Amino acid sequence: MLGALRFQRGGLTPCNFERADLATWIGAVDGVDSVQMRPDLAKFNCRNNRLAQLGLEQDRFAEHVHAAIARYGADRVGVFIGTSTAGILETEQAYGRRDPETGALPADFRYEHTHNPYSSAAFVRRYFALLGPAMVVSSACSSGAKVFGSARRAIDAGLIDAAIVGGVDSLCLTTLYGFNSLELLSPEPCRPFDTARNGISIGEAAAFAFVERMPGNQTLADDAILFFGIGESSDAHHMSSPHPEGLGARMAIEQALASAGLAADDIDYINLHGTATPSNDSAESRAIRGLFEQTPCSSTKGATGHTLGASGALEAVVSAIALRHRLIPAGINTTQPDPDLVLDYVLTSRDAPVQLVLSNSFGFGGTNCSLILGRAERFRS
Amino acid sequence: MTSGIYIESIGLVGPGLPDWPHAAGVLAGRTAYVPARTAPPPAAGLPPAERRRSSAAVKIALAAGLEAVAASGREVSTLATVFSASSGDGHNFHAICETLASDERQLSPTRFHNSVHNAPASYWSIATRSMTPSNVLCAYDGSFAAGLFESACQVVADRVPTLLIVYDTDYPEPLHAVRPIDDGFGLAMVLSPDAGLTAIARIDVRLTDAPPTLLASAKLDALRRGNPAARALPLLEALAVRRATNVVLDYLPDTRMQVGIAFSDNFSAKAGR
C-alpha cells in the first residue's frame, strides 16, 4: 500500500462483479475467491470472511497479534470489527437457489456465520482463539473508525488490555444496487473533491490494527503510531444526505481535537471522508473550512473506492502509513480540485514531516467519526 | 469487572408487554402473562415521510427508548446512545434478496435506507434532534450483552450518562428457517455514573463462563430464548422484584456476562467510588 500511495496507483476497474449490470467502477480485491479458509474456520466461508482472512495474513499482522495474545492472555484481548453488509452476498446468492416448490433456501446456507453482521467479529475472534469481549460495529460508513472508540473505552474501563480493531466489507449486490437506487454511483472512477465529481465507486477491503494501552514513555517504540483522539456525533438530519452545513462532521472533528488536547493547526494532514458525491464533499468542506486554514488534505477513495464499513479502518491504516513513512498521499483521479471546497487538496504525493493526521469517516444515516493518529515523538514533545 | 453503573430507568416493548410498568408486574408475578403480538406505537417525532417508511424495528426502538428517557427525567438530546441488535429488518432483507435474485434487480431507495443496521439509530437522532454520539452494535444472540458492555464502558471510562436501546424483530420465511425469530422485542435503559436521586439499581458487569440464568416461568423463558434482545429478561426480572443478586446473561458461545445488581437500601454504603 505504501508504494501505491507514494506512486499514486489505484485499483478501480469497470464493474464486472457477478450479476451487477451497472455502468460504474469498483475496487475489487484480487484473489478473494481463491482464498482457502483455514479448515477449522470452514463454516465462516463467504466472500467477506475470505477477505478478512486475507487481510489478517498480510504484513505479518497475525504473527504480531499471536505474540501479543501470548503476552496479555486470550481473555484480555477484545475484538471490535466494523462492517456494513458482512456476508449478505451469501444470502443474495442463496435466494437464487431457492427450492422451486417450497421456496426454501438451500440446505448449505449458513446465516449465522456469513450474513449476520457479527460473523465478521466472530471470525476474527475464532481465528485467534480469543476469549475476551467481541462485537461488530455496524453504523454504515463510520463503522471502521468507530471501533477505535469502543476499544479505547473498554481499555480505559479496565475490561481488556488490548484489542484487534478493524473493518471488513466486501462487494455485494445490495450495496451496488442500493447506491445505484440513490443515483450515487459514478459512471467513471470516482473523483473526490473535483469540480466534476459525480458519485462514488464502491470498493472492498479488510483493514486491521492492534491497539494496546499506552506503555510507559520509556518503552514506547520509535515507530509506534499513537491513537491521540476521537470524536463522534450524529447529524440528526436525514437517512442518506449529510447535514448541508457539515454540522455533525464539524462536531466530530472538534471533539477529536479536544480529546487529543490539540488545536486544528497541529494537524499536518487530513485524510478526508471524500466520497466524491457532490453533497458529501461539500458538507465535509464546510466542516473543514470552519476549523482549518490550509491543512493539506486528500481522499484516498480515488484509489480504493469507497469501502463502506471498512473505510474508517482502511483510512486509519493509510494515516498510519503516512505517519510512519512521513508521506502526504495524493488523492488520485482528481484533476481539478473544486475551488469552492478545501484550500489545499493534494494532487501529488510528497514526503513531509507528518506528525499528526486527522481521518474522517461520515456515514449513511448521519453517523460521524474523526480519528487523530500521531507519531511517538509528537507525544514525547 | 466494572462498578459504579446506575440504572436510572427502563423502557420495554414486547409480545403482550406494552411497556415497562406492565412488564415489571408480569416479571414480579403480580400480573398474569398474556402473550400477544408485539404492537409498538407509531414512531413518534418523525417527519411524515420517515414515519411512513419506519419498520417495526424503528418503532420498537423509538418506543422503548422514549419510555426510558421519559422515566429518567433527562433531556433526550443530551444522552449518548448505544443501539444493539442481532439483525436488521428481516422483511426488508427478504424483499431485497428477492429483488436481487430476479432479472430486474432495481432496489428502491427506501429499501436500501432501511437495510442499514443503523437505520433505527438514524431515525432516533432525526426524531429526537439529538446530535450526540451513537454507537450501533451486533453480537448475534449476545447483542444485549454487547450493548450493555459498550454502555458500561461509556459510563465507567467517560463518566457520561448513556441510553442503551436493544431490539430485534421477526424474520419471514424462508429466512425464518435459519433465523427463527417470531416477534419483536425491545428494551432500553438509561445508565449513569452517579446514583442521583432516581437510580433504581446499581450494577456491575464482568465476563464469566457460568451458565445463563433461566426464568422460572416456562412462557417467559421461551420469550427469553426466542429473541436476542429478550436475553436481558433475567436482569429485568431481578429489577422488577428488587432482588439483589447476580444474573448471567447470554453473550458469546463460550463467554457470558455476569451482572451484579444492588438496590438503594444497600448501594449507598458500597457506592463510595
Image: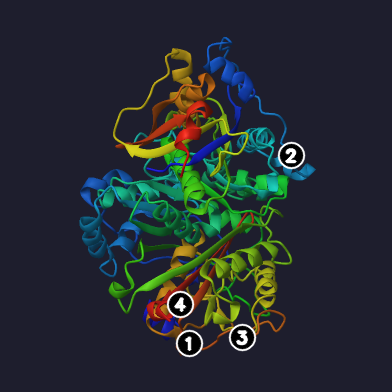
Q: CA distance from mark 4 to mark 1?
A: 13 Å
- Residue A145, which numbered label? none
Residue bearing the label numbered 2:
B52
Whether residue B211 is situated above or below residue B4 in the rendered picture: above
Q: Position of residue B50 (x, y in %)?
A: 73, 44
Mark 4 surroundings within 10 Å by alpha-carbon count, few (fewer than 14), some (14 through 19), many (20 or more): many
On the image, the x and y values in percent for residue B95 come to: 58, 39
User: Which SS class for mark 2?
Assistant: helix
Instruction: Name the image quarter holding residue B2.
Output: top left
The chain letter for the residue carrying disc 4 is A
How would you rate the neighbour count of disc 1 (Cα within 10 Å): few for under 14, some for 14-19, many for 20 or more? some
Image coordinates for residue B59, horizontal then vertical, percent: 66, 35
- Mark 3 lies on residue: A344
Q: Which amino acid type is marked by label 4?
A: Gly
| Chain where mark 1 sits | A
**Label 4 sits on residue:** A10
B60 up-or-down from A308: above or below: above
Tell me what residue is drawn at x 47 percent, y 71 percent.
A304
- Mark 4 vs mark 1: tell me if same chain: yes
Residue at image location 30% in from the left, 50% down from the top? A76
Label 3, secondary structure: give it: loop
Residue beneath label 1, please? A349
The crowding category of the residue bearing disc 3, from other C-alpha atoms within 10 Å (few below 14, some 14 to 19, many at least 20), is: some
Do the dots labelled 4 and 3 sit on one chain?
yes
Identify the residue at image location x=58%, y=25%. B14
Residue A212: x and y, percent? Answer: 34, 62
The local secondary structure at tag 1 comes to loop
The type of residue carrying mark 1 is Ser
Seen from the viewer's position, the closer of residues A280 and B134 is: B134
User: How far is the residue under mark 4 from the one under mark 3?
Assistant: 21 Å
Tell me: residue A276, above or below residue B5.
below
How many numbered markers are drawn? 4
